Amino acid sequence: MIRFKTLGLAAIVAVTAFTTGALAQEHGHDTKTPERQSWSFAGPFGSYDRAQLQRGFQVFREVCSNCHSAKGLYFRNLAQPGGPQFSEAQVKALAAEYKVKDGPADDGSYYERPGRPADRLPSNYANPEAAKAALGAAPPDMTVLAKARSYSRGFPLFLVDPIIQYQEHGVDYIYSLIALGYSDDKDPNHNDYFPGGHIAMGKPLSDGQVEYTDGSPKTVQQYAKDVASYLMWMAEPKLEDRKKTGFRVMVFLIIFAGLLYFTKRRVWAAAH
C-alpha cells in the first residue's frame, strides 16, 4: 500500500513538472515567475496602508491614467473608509480639476463641466478603439487589474496558498512587471515577467518621475509598490470589511461548536 502511494505521489509530481515545463515553453523560456512581496494587506488580519494608497493614487493619476482607464472608480470612493481616505474637501477639489462630459442640455447638446465627487474618473480616450489608434494597442482597464492578473506558483504551493490565504498573486505580478521586468536596454518592450517576454507598454516609470511630499523614496521600486497597492484597493475596496466579517464568523462558529458539544454531552449524560 505504501509503495502504491509513493508511486502515485511520484506520478503527480512528474505530471506537474511536465505541465509546468510545457507552459513555460508556451510562454517563452525567458518568462520569470514573480517573487512574493511583503504587503500590509496580506494575511487574515492585513489592512491597507493609507499613506501608501494616497501615494499610489498619485502615481496612477500622473502616470498610469495617461493611457489606462479606471471605469469602476468614482471620485467619492477616494474618501470612503477602507481606502486612501482623502478628505471630502480634497476629493471635491480633485474632481473639479477634471472636465466631465454631461448632458443633454435643454437644446439637446452635450457640454463639459467641472467634475464632481459623484462622477467617474474620466479616461483620456473615448473608447478602446480610440486608445488603440493612438497607442497601437488598447491598454486594459485598471479597475480590477490586481485581481484579474495572476500566475501559477506550481506544485505544491498552489495547495498551500488557500491555507495561508495567499491572494496577492496579482500585485506581486504587477510589481515585478513594472519594477523588475524591463531588463533589456536595447529592447524597450522586453519584459521578463510578461508571457512571451514582449509587452506593448514601454517602461512606464523612472526614478524621480513622481514628486512625493511625505519623504518616501522616489524610486521605481517604491512607485511600483505604491501603485500596485492602490490597484489592489481598487480591485477589492472592501477587503478590510471582508476580513473583519470573516474573523467574527470564525469566532461565532467556534463558540457555537463548543456550545453544541457541551449540550450534546449534557443531553446524553441525562439520557444514560
Image: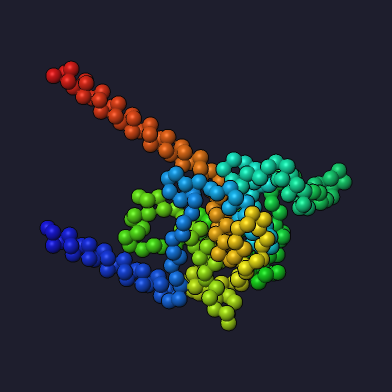
Residue 231 visible in the current orientation:
no
Q: Nearer the viewer, residue 17 or 130?
A: 17
Quadrant in which the C terminus appears: top left
Give the residue at x 67% y 70%: 135
- Say which quarter of the image contains residue 262: top left
Give the residue at x 15% y 61%: 4
Return the residue found at the far right.
Answer: 107
- Say which quarter of the image contains residue 26: bottom left
Give the residue at x 41% y 35%: 249
Give the left or right position of residue 96, taking residue 69 as reference.
right
Image spot of residue 10 (x, y percent): 22, 66
Give the left or right position of residue 186, taking residue 122 as reference.
left
Give the left or right position of residue 73, taking residue 162 as reference.
right
Give the residue at x 66% y 62%: 210
Image spot of residue 108 (x, y percent): 84, 47
Image spot of residue 142 (x, y percent): 60, 57
In the picture shown, does residue 60 fall above or below 23? above
